[in-house]
Image (cartoon, helix red, strand yellow):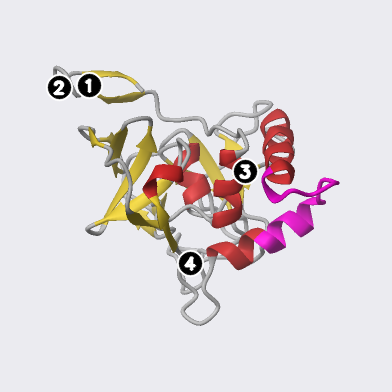
C-alpha cells in the first residue's frame, strides 16, 4: 500500500505510488508505523532535495527520522511552499536566492532563516493552517506557477495550462488571455519566478496536437 508522502500543488500530503522527481523535508511527521499524524510541518525550512545525492540511502519513513515527501517536479514543490535545498541543490538555491532578491527589490540577499520565515507567512494561513492563496490576473503570471480553476490545479506554461495529476500532467488546455485566477504558488516565490527563476519540470506531458506523450 502506498505511503502518505506525496505532496500536491495545494500543499496536501496524499498516498500515491508515484514518487516524482524531487524529495522534500518538513521534519518528522510520521509514527513508528509510518503513518502521518495531524502535524504537516515541524519547522519552517521546507526544502526540496535531489532523490540521489552522494550515494546516500534512506529507508523511507524510518522511525525518528524526517518524513520523506515527494513531488512530481519542482513547480509542484514551489507551489506547496518549498524552496531549493542549500546543500544538495546548491546551484539552484543560489539561483533562487538571487531571483528572490531581485523580485523583492532588496539590496542584499537574506539568510536562509529569513527567507524561510517570509515563505512560511506566505504559504500558510495561521487561522486554518492550510495553504494561503491569492488572486491576481493570469496575464501577468510567469511560467511554472500553479493556479486553481474549478478546483483543478493547473501549471502555467507559455500559452498552455497543464492539469496536474500525481503521475504527470494531462492534456494541455489553451491559456486564457487574462482574468483573475486563484494562485497556489506563494506570492514571494511568484515574484522570484517573475524575476527569472525557472523550476525544473517533469519532462513528459501530453502533446496537444496529437495526444502523444512528449517533452514539456
Q: Which mark is residue 192?
A: 3
Tell me which residue sits at (37%, 53%) in the image. Answer: 3
Mark sitting on residue 88: none
Residue 108 is situated, as x and y percent measured from the top left of the image, at: 85, 46
Is 68 placed above or below 133 here?
A: above
Identify the mark at residue 207; answer none if there is no mark.
1
The answer for how far apart the CA atoms under marks 1 and 2 are is 5 Å
Residue at numbered disc 4: 132
Crowding around mark 2 (Cα neighbors within 10 Å: few <14, some 14 to 19, many 20+) is few
Q: Earlier in the sequence, mark 2 or mark 4?
A: 4
The mark closer to the camera, 2 or 3, is 3
Query: In terms of sequence position, does the residue under pointer 2 or pointer 3 come before the other?
Result: 3
- Quadrant of residue 214 in the image? top left
Q: Residue at x 50, y 38 (%)?
A: 74
Against 133, residue 69 (above or below) is above
Q: CA distance from mark 2 to mark 3?
A: 33 Å
Residue 57: x, y in percent? Answer: 60, 35
For label 1, the SS is: loop
Q: Is residue 143 magenta?
A: no
Q: Which residues are magenta?
A: 103-118
**Secondary structure under badge 2?**
loop
In which image quadrant can residue 167 be found? top left
Task: Farthest residue to the bottom: give it.
Answer: 127
Mark sitting earlier along the chain (4/3): 4
Amino acid at each position: 500500500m502506498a505511503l502518505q508522502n506525496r505532496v500536491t500543488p495545494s500543499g496536501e500530503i496524499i498516498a500515491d505510488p508515484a514518487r516524482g522527481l524531487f524529495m522534500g523535508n518538513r521534519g518528522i511527521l510520521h509514527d513508528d508505523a509510518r503513518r502521518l499524524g495531524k502535524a504537516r510541518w515541524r519547522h519552517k525550512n521546507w526544502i526540496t532535495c535531489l532523490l540521489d545525492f552522494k550515494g546516500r540511502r534512506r529507508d523511507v519513513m524510518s522511525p525518528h527520522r524526517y518524513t520523506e515527501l515527494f513531488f512530481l517536479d519542482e513547480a509542484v514543490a514551489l507551489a506547496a511552499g518549498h524552496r531549493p535545498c542549500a546543500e544538495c541543490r546548491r546551484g539552484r538555491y543560489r539561483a533562487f536566492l538571487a531571483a528572490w532578491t531581485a523580485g523583492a527589490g532588496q539590496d542584499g540577499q537574506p539568510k536562509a532563516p529569513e527567507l524561510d520565515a517570509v515563505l512560511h507567512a506566505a504559504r500558510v494561513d495561521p487561522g486554518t493552517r492550510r495553504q494561503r492563496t491569492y488572486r491576481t490576473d493570469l496575464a501577468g503570471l510567469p511560467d511554472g506557477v500553479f493556479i486553481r480553476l474549478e478546483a483543478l490545479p493547473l501549471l502555467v506554461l507559455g500559452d498552455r495550462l497543464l492539469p496536474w495529476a500525481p503521475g504527470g500532467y494531462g492534456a494541455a488546455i489553451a491559456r486564457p488571455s487574462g482574468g483573475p485566477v486563484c494562485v497556489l504558488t506563494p506570492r514571494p516565490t511568484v515574484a522570484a519566478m517573475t524575476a527569472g527563476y525557472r523550476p525544473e519540470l517533469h519532462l513528459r506531458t501530453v502533446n496537444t496536437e496529437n495526444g502523444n506523450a512528449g517533452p514539456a
